[in-house]
């Protein structure tokens, strides 16, 4: 049966205009003229039989019907894009799409990828780097994370262990803090905006309470590390991510590193997570993490 759909070009013009809030910007993104996009929008609204935009000054604003259609069209186009990318990936050979935090990717994973490609030259790896809060699995086959508290229970149950993670407070040499029998007193505590439970887990494992004069927070672990290096406070960081700074003496760890109970794991989020390419990557990653200690 023939699907009662408007032209795909009209839906793309509509979605781009709705997302960007401007016919001009939509035309630039789509490589079309302003007039061509405007005509596609008029044709779509005529075929729908209802207006999808309201006038807003010199621009356009989605009305309630337009917003409802935008959500449907955006999901459909996202699905098409993901399916197309997967098809192209499969045509090029074995591939695995991995999502992980930007800091883990930049400071640990990417510098070691040459060894993976030497061991598995036929496998292509695609990385999505994002913040911990946004660490979801749109289009990814595997999501690497230590804090999986925000994942659905079914996904947490499927997590594939990769190895332990150990967190500890780090600061520049000579930073003014005091370590007592049951208390760590420091002027400023640096926290990650989206994984604040890390300090709670460390206190429980170390048997120390933390007293801080004030607190600074950042959305990326990389920024937390840079803030500690700049002397802004004490950051709580996974040991592997600051190994070079500790060895060079730019940071010191005045207290112990504590293993977190959940450890690092890969959450499979697509059927391709069970493919040989993904299995090869996970085996290499597990061995590399163990070798790095």
Image: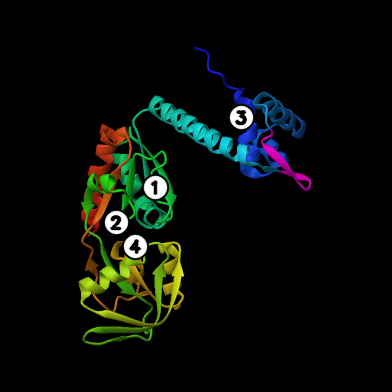
Is there CB contact under 8 Å for labels 1 and 2?
no
Q: How far apart in space, not on screen, are marks 4 and 1 (Cα)?
A: 22 Å
Q: Which mark is residue 136?
A: 1
Q: Residue 11 carries which label?
A: 3
Question: Between tags 3 and 1, which lies in front?
Answer: 3
Q: How far apart in space, not on screen, are marks 3 and 1 (Cα)?
A: 27 Å
Q: In which quarter of the view is residue 91 placed?
A: top left
Residue at the disc numbered 4 = 241
| Sooner in the amino-acid sequence: mark 4 or mark 1 | 1
* Vertical order, 8 against 144 (above or below): above
* Vertical order, 90 against 115 (above or below): above
Question: Between tags 1 and 2, which lies in front?
Answer: 1
Q: What element carries label 1?
A: loop
Q: Is mark 2 on a helix, strand or loop?
A: loop
Image spot of residue 240 (x, y percent): 30, 62
Q: Residue 146 carries which label?
A: 2
Instruction: Examine the structure image and report whether residue 56 is included in the region drawn in magenta.
Output: yes
Mark 4 burial class by Cα count in 10 Å: few <14, some 14-19, many 20+: some
Mark 1 burial class by Cα count in 10 Å: few <14, some 14-19, many 20+: some
Question: Between tags 2 and 3, which lies in front?
Answer: 3
């Amino acid at each position: 049966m023939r699907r009662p759909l408007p032209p795909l070009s009209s839906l793309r013009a509509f979605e781009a205009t709705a997302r960007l809030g401007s016919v001009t910007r939509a035309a630039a993104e789509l490589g079309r003229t302003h007039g061509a996009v405007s005509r596609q929008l008029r044709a779509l609204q005529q075929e729908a039989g209802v207006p999808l935009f309201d006038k807003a000054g010199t621009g356009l604003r989605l009305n309630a019907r337009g917003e409802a259609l935008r959500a449907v069209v955006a999901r459909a186009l996202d699905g098409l894009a993901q399916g197309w990318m997967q098809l192209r990936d499969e045509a090029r050979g074995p591939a695995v799409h991995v999502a992980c935090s930007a800091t883990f990717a930049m400071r640990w994973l990417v510098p070691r990828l040459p060894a993976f490609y030497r061991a598995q030259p036929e496998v292509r790896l695609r990385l999505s780097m994002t913040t911990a809060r946004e660490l979801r699995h749109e289009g990814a086959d595997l999501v690497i994370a230590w804090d999986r508290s925000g994942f659905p229970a079914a996904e947490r149950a499927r997590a594939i262990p990769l190895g332990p993670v150990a967190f500890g407070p780090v600061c520049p040499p000579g930073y003014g803090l005091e370590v007592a029998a049951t208390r760590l007193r420091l002027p400023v505590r640096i926290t990650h905006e989206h994984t604040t439970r890390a300090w709670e887990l460390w206190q429980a494992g170390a048997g120390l309470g933390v007293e801080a004069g004030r607190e600074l927070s950042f959305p990326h672990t990389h920024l937390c590390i840079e803030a500690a290096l700049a002397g802004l406070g004490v950051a709580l960081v996974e040991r592997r991510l600051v190994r070079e700074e500790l060895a060079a003496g730019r940071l010191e760890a005045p207290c112990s590193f504590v293993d977190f109970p959940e450890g690092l794991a890969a959450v499979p989020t697509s059927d391709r997570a069970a493919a040989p390419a993904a299995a090869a990557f996970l085996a290499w990653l597990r061995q590399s993490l163990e070798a790095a200690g």
